[in-house]
Every structure is written in C-alpha cells, then in structure tokens.
C-alpha cells in the first residue's frame, strides 16, 4: 500500500512539474529549462512503463497500434528529405511526447477517480498562478513569460476545459461553483491574450460541453445558442482589442492577407507528397516564404 502511494505521489509530482515549467524559459527553449522539460517527459514515460510492467496491465488495441505505426512511418519521411535541423527537432519532440502520452494514458486506467480529480485541480491551480500573475502585471496582451501571447492562450485552454467540465458535470455544488469561477477566469485570460484561435477554440469547447450536457438534461437549441452568444458577447466586452483583431479594422495585421497564400502553398506541397510527405522541415519553413510588408 505504501509503495502504491509513493508511486502515485511521484507521478503527481512529475506531471505537476511538467505543467509548471512549460511556461518558463521562453516556452522551455532556454537550455536549462529545455533539459528539465525533456527530462520530465522521459521520467514520466519511464515511471509509467515501470508501473505498467509491474502490474502486467499494458495492452494496445491492434487498430491503435496500426495507426501509431503509420504515423511513425509518415514522420520518418525526414530521413528521405532531411531539409532542416528543425524538421528533425520537431520529429523528436512529437515522438517523445506521443510515447509519454500513450504510457500516461495507459497508466491512468488503473488510477482512482479521486486521484485523477485531484491531479486536474492541481493543473488548474498551477495555471491559475501564471494567469493571475500576468493579470497583476497589467501589460496587454498578457504573455506570462511566453514568447507569443497566442501560445499562452492555448496553455490556458487546458484549465478552461477542466473547469468547464467541473462546472457542468460535477454533482457537488461547491465544486461546480469553483469550476464555474475558474472557467470564467480562464476565459477572461484567453481574451486578454488577444488570441483569436484560442477564443474560437474556447467557444467550440463550450459548444461541445453544452451538447454533452444537453444529452443528459433537456436543453433547447435556442438556449444553447443564447449561452454561446452570451459567452462571445462577454469576450467582446472584456477585450475590445480582440474584436479589432478579429475585424482587422484599419488593416493593421498584414498576416491576415498572407494566410490564403500560405494555405494554398501547403495544399500544393501535400498534393505533391500525399503519402510520405516532404520532410517536417518543409512545413516548418513554409510560413517563412512570405515576408509581410510592414
């Protein structure tokens, strides 16, 4: 029993540490932070693999194994056309994270609901510290140490999704109240990062959550549309700068007019190499082929 508790405590520490350092060192690009980040990914993967081996509980469905093998073959295309170092770097990053994710997901099947619930609240608490600190500093758009505010907004989407699920699907009133308050706080933070993509993603997450909630309780489509419209209106009132960025009033964002060219070039590149791709580095440098006139 004590060994099991020690295993749970170590896994909790590793996951919490990974979340905590994700925003440090300019998004884990500083050499020291990058070393810690990769070491934590390795540590989580090895710790989960160790427990799964001891419990003899690791199994993979043939379908999932086939899809994983196909994905690895597609990403191995960089060996045929290793266009840039960044292509290899991204491939290594994706494979490492995928291995850690699969092993962690397999380990979660044997964990108790209470432990998973506490881990989710711990993730929310860590992200809340970053968000509150960024709001206190007062600079807009908020970044909290991230290089790009859009990345920080994407980081906050995790906390927003957790809190929204707690607010809708938990039965305890206190937890639902905390979940609702957390979802509002994270949504406000996303709008203050002025991220269009993260804002749309937050609305999409809310729509799917409401659909799931409506499956359990009878909610009309008109009420669901009203909730989403109210959420969008609240975001617009909280961040007029985000509205200007959506509408691009004054033609201030030249990248808005570059995106169709980038998407068309990406489609042509995929059409030329539909199976094995052209090396991840090609996609990495695709957006750099267009220099916006500033």
Image (cartoon, grey):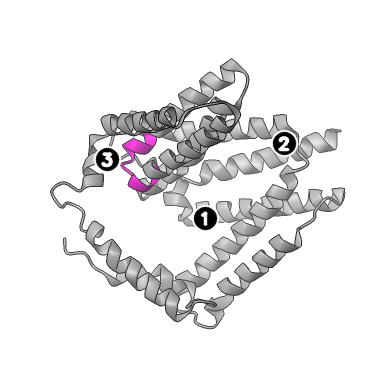
Which residue lies at the image location 44% right of the left edge and 42% below the top edge?
204
Query: So how many labels did they put on this image?
Result: 3
Which residue position is annotated with label 1? 34
Q: Residue furthest top?
A: 173
Q: Is residue 234 left or right of residue 127?
A: left
Q: Is residue 43 magenta?
A: no
**Does 195 lie within the magenta span?**
yes
> Which corner quadrant holds the C terminus?
bottom left
- Checking the image for residue 242, the label placed there is 3
Q: Position of residue 22 (x, y in %)?
A: 50, 47
Above or below, 249 against 78 in this view is above
Towards the viewer: 161 or 232: 232
Task: Tell which tag, 3 or 2, sits nearer the viewer.
Answer: 3
> Marks 3/2: CA distance?
41 Å
Q: CA distance from mark 1 to mark 3?
A: 31 Å
Q: Earlier in the sequence, mark 1 or mark 2?
A: 2
Give the foreground label among 1 and 3.
3
Viewport quadrant of the N terminus: top right
Q: Is residue 12 visible?
A: yes
Residue 277 vs residue 101: left or right? left
Q: Which residue is mark 2?
A: 9
Proximity of marks 3 and 2: CB atoms separated by less than 8 Å: no
Q: Which residues are magenta?
A: 189-198
Q: Is residue 125 visible?
A: no
The reply, left or right, for residue 258 in relation to residue 185 is: left
The residue lying at 42 percent from left, 44 percent from top is 201
On screen, residue 97 above or below 86: above
Depth check, front residue: 65 or 152: 65
Judge by depth and name the residue closer to the eye, 141 or 6.
Answer: 141
Which residue is situated farthest in the bottom direction here? 80
Q: Nearer the viewer, mark 1 or mark 2?
A: 2
Q: Position of residue 221 (x, y in %)?
A: 45, 32
């Amino acid at each position: 029993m004590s060994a099991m508790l020690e295993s749970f405590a170590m896994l909790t520490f590793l996951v919490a540490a990974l979340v905590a350092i994700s925003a440090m060192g300019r998004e884990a690009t500083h050499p020291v932070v990058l070393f810690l980040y990769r070491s934590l990914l390795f540590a989580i993967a090895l710790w989960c693999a160790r427990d799964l081996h001891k419990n003899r509980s690791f199994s993979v469905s043939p379908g999932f194994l086939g899809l994983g093998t196909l994905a690895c073959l597609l990403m191995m295309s960089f060996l045929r056309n290793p266009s840039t170092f960044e292509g290899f770097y991204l491939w290594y990053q994706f494979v490492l994270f995928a291995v850690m994710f699969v092993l962690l997901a397999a380990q979660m099947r044997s964990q108790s609901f209470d432990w998973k619930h506490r881990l989710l609240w711990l993730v929310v608490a860590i992200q809340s510290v970053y968000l509150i600190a960024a709001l206190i500093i007062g600079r807009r758009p908020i970044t909290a140490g991230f290089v790009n505010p859009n990345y920080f907004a994407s980081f906050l989407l995790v906390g927003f999704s957790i809190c929204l699920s707690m607010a809708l699907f938990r039965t305890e009133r206190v937890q639902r109240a905390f979940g609702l308050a957390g979802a509002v706080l994270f949504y406000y933070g996303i709008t203050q990062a002025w991220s269009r993509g993260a804002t749309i993603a937050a609305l999409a997450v809310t729509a799917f959550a409401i659909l799931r909630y409506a499956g359990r309780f009878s909610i009309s489509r008109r009420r669901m549309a009203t909730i989403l419209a109210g959420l969008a209106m609240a975001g617009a009132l909280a961040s007029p700068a985000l509205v200007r960025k959506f509408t691009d009033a004054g033609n201030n964002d030249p990248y808005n007019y570059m995106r169709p060219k980038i998407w068309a070039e990406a489609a042509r590149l995929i059409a030329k190499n539909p199976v094995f791709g052209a090396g991840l580095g090609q996609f990495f440098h695709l957006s750099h082929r267009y220099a916006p006139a500033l």
